[in-house]
Image (cartoon, rainbow, N blue to C red):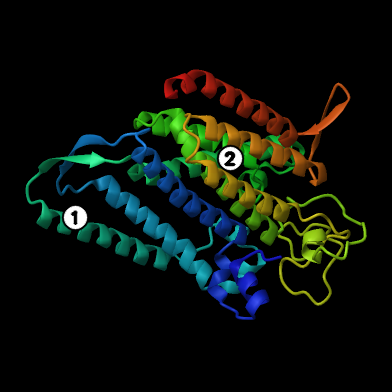
Amino acid sequence: MYATLFDLIKNTIGIEIKPLAIVNTFGLLVAISFFAAYYVMSLELKRLEKEGKIKAKRVNKRYEAVINPMEFIFNGILGFVFGWKIVYMLTNFDLVRQNSQEVIFSTQGSIMWGFIVAAVFVGQKYIEYRAQKKLYPEPVEKEITEHPFQIMGQITIVAFIAGILGAKVFHILEDWSNFIQDPIDAIFSLSGLTYYGGLICGGLGVVYYANKNGIKPLHILDAGATTMMLAYGLGRLGCHLAGDGDWGIDNLAAKPGWIPQFLWSSKYPNNVLNADPGNVIEGCVGPYCNELINPVYPTPLYEVMMCLVLFAILWSIRKRIKIPGMLFGVYLVMNGVERFLIEKIRVNSLYKVFGVEFTQAEMISSIIVLLGIALILYSRKVYKPALV
């Protein structure tokens, strides 16, 4: 497995690019999934606007060059943090390789580079102000057309913040015993994120923000149906590459001849959890030198493949579905069934109620399937008569 982009490139093509040691593989795939979500959802909002389901609005916008002290302060702080921490990490490769998270959340850094980069960031903001001053020496108010897809930047930020917080909270609730033992590590660790927490909280945040900007909840949910399926698939690829613990149960059965080994089972060598610490890889040097004792099902890969297929299906039917909310209802059913099935071979904490054992994801996925069916029935009842 590949904890960082440095490891991935080194082990696949044999090239060492030391600065890439600061790029966490899982984090990189999460970032890619957000960029993909941004692009796909922008396309969907444009489509819905073209179909007349959502509308652009005319707004008055004031153009003027103003020095906002808070913007300069923010830029200075951002530049200082970037120089103090990122430049330090780029110039201390061996230390970062040992434990990147410890370096990130420590007080280690370069004060000199912090002030240098802070000055550059503040200077750039001042250059922007001077350019605005030349363009608008006096305040000007114009009426402009604001399209729904133009707020995708804000929507992405809302989804990211709400999603990460939700994913972390749900993971803590799912793994409460470890949280009690080491709450600081559980909160600030870059691993330990629960998908459904991110889905629920991120989705609620996006619906709230979009509704404030004139996009009805069912329409923004429909726009997010294909988006979330694709983003989840890409995110699971990050889980697999990093070996973050989202693997399956032991798979000791003989491999059928028709299936490649990497799809049948894996010991997740060099996993970021350093799982099975007594099982050290011979000749390995570095912070991630363990592999699992028994091979397991590579369930993240299964989910990647399933989600990409489901994304393709949703993408192919999205224009045929005219009833608001129905596409999202179909997504919920697909998502819930996919996750419920994969839970049968995944490693998870079990809950037991009235003698019945289940995982948090099995419970939530079952509820999501029921909600999807309910939304489909509701949408057909409320909106279909208006389309006939």
Q: In the displayed image of the protein, which residue is found farthest to the front?
A: 388
Q: Is residue 179 visible?
A: no
Q: Nearer the viewer, residue 48 or 186?
A: 48
Q: Secondary structure at mark 2?
A: helix
Residue occupying image coordinates x 88% and y 62%: 256
Camera-near label (2 vs 1) is 2
Q: Nearer the viewer, residue 295 or 292?
A: 295
The residue carrying pointer 1 sits among few (fewer than 14), some (14 to 19) or many (20 or more) residues within 10 Å by Cα, namely some
Q: Three-letter amino acid code at disc 1?
A: Tyr
**Residue 9 at x, y = what percent?**
61, 74
Q: Three-letter amino acid code at disc 2?
A: Gly
Which residue in the structure is indicated by mark 2? 198
Q: Quadrant of residue 22?
A: bottom right
**Residue 167 at x, y = what percent?**
61, 40
Q: Quadrant of the N terminus?
A: bottom right
Q: Nearer the viewer, residue 17 or 45?
A: 45
Please determine whether, in this image, residue 254 is positioned above or below residue 74: below
Q: Earlier in the sequence, mark 2 or mark 1?
A: 1
Disc 2 versus disc 1: distance between alpha carbons?
A: 37 Å
**Residue 227 at x, y = what percent?**
52, 45
Q: Quadrant of residue 288?
A: bottom right
Q: Secondary structure at mark 1?
A: helix
Which residue in the structure is indicated by mark 1? 129
The residue carrying pointer 2 sits among few (fewer than 14), some (14 to 19) or many (20 or more) residues within 10 Å by Cα, namely many
Q: Nearer the viewer, residue 158 or 233?
A: 233
**Residue 320 at x, y = what percent?**
49, 38
Residue occupying image coordinates x 45% and y 35%: 220
Q: Is label 2 in contact with label 1 (beta carbons under 8 Å)? A: no
Q: Is residue 11 visible?
A: yes
Residue occupying image coordinates x 54% and y 46%: 316
